[in-house]
Image: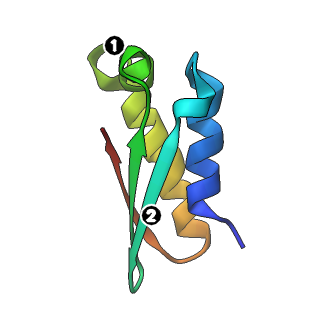
Amino acid sequence: MVELKKVLTDIAKAIVDDPEKVDVIETVEGDNVMLELHVAEDDMGKVIGRHGKIAKSIRLVMKAAANTVGKRVTVEIR
């Protein structure tokens, strides 16, 4: 089974300069999964990307991963 929290953590750690500061908080309500991604202040731009392209891509990958296990996911970047 796909662990959505681990997938998001691995993606974020690959993008940022300070992987130790990456933290993901998972909230599950039935089939809905809420993931809050926290990164260092300096890495925020890298995670969001120009015009939000990286953030959109992360959300797209997470939705595909959630779809394989029959869940719905929301990703918040803070």
Which residue in the structure is indicated by mark 1?
50
Name the element at disc 1. Answer: helix
3 or 78: nearer the eye?
78
- Which residue position holds label 2? 26
Q: Amino acid at mark 1?
A: Arg
Q: Where residue 18 is drawn, which disc sits there? A: none
Of the two numbered discs 1 and 2 in the rendering, the one whose residue sits closer to the viewer? 2
Report the residue that reaches farthest toward the bottom.
30
Dot 1 or dot 2, earlier in sequence: 2
Q: As drawn, is 70 to the left or to the right of 46?
A: right
The type of residue carrying mark 2 is Glu
Look at 60% across and 74% down and name the residue there.
69
Taking 11 as reference, is 47 above or below it? above
Residue name at image x 44 percent, y 18 percent:
43
Q: Nearer the viewer, residue 23 or 68?
A: 23
Residue found 39% across the figure and 86% down from its top: 30
Q: Position of residue 21 (x, y in %)?
A: 52, 32
Disc 2, SS: strand
Q: How many marks?
A: 2
Q: Residue at x 48, y 50 (%)?
A: 24
Quarter of the image with the N terminus in it: bottom right
Q: CA distance from mark 1 to mark 2?
A: 26 Å
In the displayed structure, 59 sits above or below 65; it is above
Q: Quadrant of the C terminus?
A: top left
